[in-house]
Amino acid sequence: MPRLGLTMVEGTVVEWRAQSGDNVDKGQILLVIESEKVSVEVEAFAAGTLAAIYVEPGTTVPIGSLLGAIVEPGEAFDRDSFEKSFVPEIEGAPAGATPAAAERRAPPVPSRAPAAGVKAAPAARALAKKLGIDLESVSGTGPGGRITVEDVERAGSSGPGLAIDVDGSGPALLLIAGFAVDRTSWRRQIDGLRSSFMVVSYDHRGIGASRPMPDESLTIATMAEDAVASLSEKGPATVVGASMGAAIAIELAIAHPDVVGALVLITPAVEKDARLEAVLRSWIEFESPQSEARIRSMLPWFLSRHFLAEVPKREATAQALRAMAARTPLPALRHQVRAFDAWLGTRVGNLSRISVPTLVIAGAEDLLVPFAQAERVAGSIPGARLEVLDGAGHAVTIEGAERVNELITNFIRRG
């Protein structure tokens, strides 16, 4: 289901103009969808055979939902496996963006996208994308050397299977996302920093396009190991973590100081806090991450009063959260809450072991992690510098994006 506008959340399939098994041409009208009383004809993105229709006329589904599948004529296709492995490509509208600006923002391209010339079953391609596996490195055991789902599963049986993006060139800059969000949450930082740095971002285990969580063994320490894996020998890097991502960055700096050249901690939480724990647990009690009640409950904790009062910016942020919620399964969020809660309070006495240059950024109106805690973090790390953004809430990377980018750039250049 494509996004037809910045406020679109879902669409309704009105009519299919081709049936399963029909051969279709690129550009041919396949179906008609409706959103906000506007009907739009959707064209085939490629020539081939319409192998499956997943959404029947009259059905309303969220943006990013799988509508149908086109394969090469005669290509083997498993309808159920493809649906199970499907990864929606949804780009959340950045807060405050104008329609023209949103149109210029292309969805992020995984740095290890499958090569088009590789012979692989559609379900195998989808799974490879989800696990961040380069199909050129996979040996196919299917007919004619075609790569099967089983081949991809074997290739991804070791390691965390992270989906990673690398943007720009220059000194390495690793961005570690916080709780319940994926790498698209850094879009404003990536857009502002990739002209000067090689910006690496990734999805946590079980989130977005990374491999689903196999069990409940997730810890902040294992997530720090994932951060090391995402660098893939690109370090030492300036490591930037926000909220729970700051906890991972701290763990990384303590456990793997060799890969951290500098540290930027945004709204860092390190202490046990009953309010933070209660809020995080409340966000995983909804039946679905996409629940509108859940999205609305997050906004006042993320945003400042001023930002909440600006309706276009507030609603654009809500839309971005909805889009990311479609890529954040509830079990993975519960794993994150358990891991984060277990970590809080365990490294307070170890902050003095961090020996790299450190910048701490906080929001003056942050309700989740009050800036007084950020002050204590900065005071515990030798030589750390604290910057407090007036009027900003917990989501300082959204509310003060330009200022955050400026602080990061100047911090790195000054060494």
Image (tube, rainbow, N blue to C red):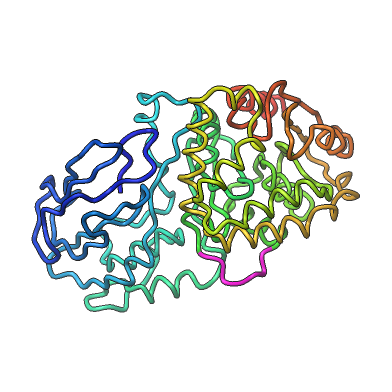
Q: Kindly indicate the quadrant of the structure image that contains residue 394.
A: top right
Q: How far across and down, in percent of the image, does residue 10 sit?
A: 35, 45
Is 374 placed above or below 79 here? Answer: above
> What is the span of residues highlighted in magenta in the rendered image?
212-218
Is 173 located above or below residue 333 in the figure? above
Identified at 43% across, 60% down, the residue is 130
Residue 377 position, x and y percent, is 84, 39
On the picture, is 287 further left or further right than 10?
Answer: right
- Asked whether 168 or 11 is in front, the reply is 11
Identify the residue at horizontal 68%, vertical 26% (top origin).
392
Within the magenta stretch, is there residue 214?
Answer: yes
Q: Is residue 289 visible?
A: yes
Q: In this rendering, does residue 264 appear at all?
A: no
Magenta span main SS: loop
Report the front residue among 94 and 406. Answer: 94
Q: Position of residue 271 (x, y in %)?
A: 84, 47
Quadrant of the rendered structure where residue 54 is? bottom left
Front residue of 232 and 184: 184
213 horizontally vs 326: left or right: right
Residue at 50% x, 58% y is: 210
In the rendered image, residue 357, in percent from the top left (x then y), is placed at 78, 35
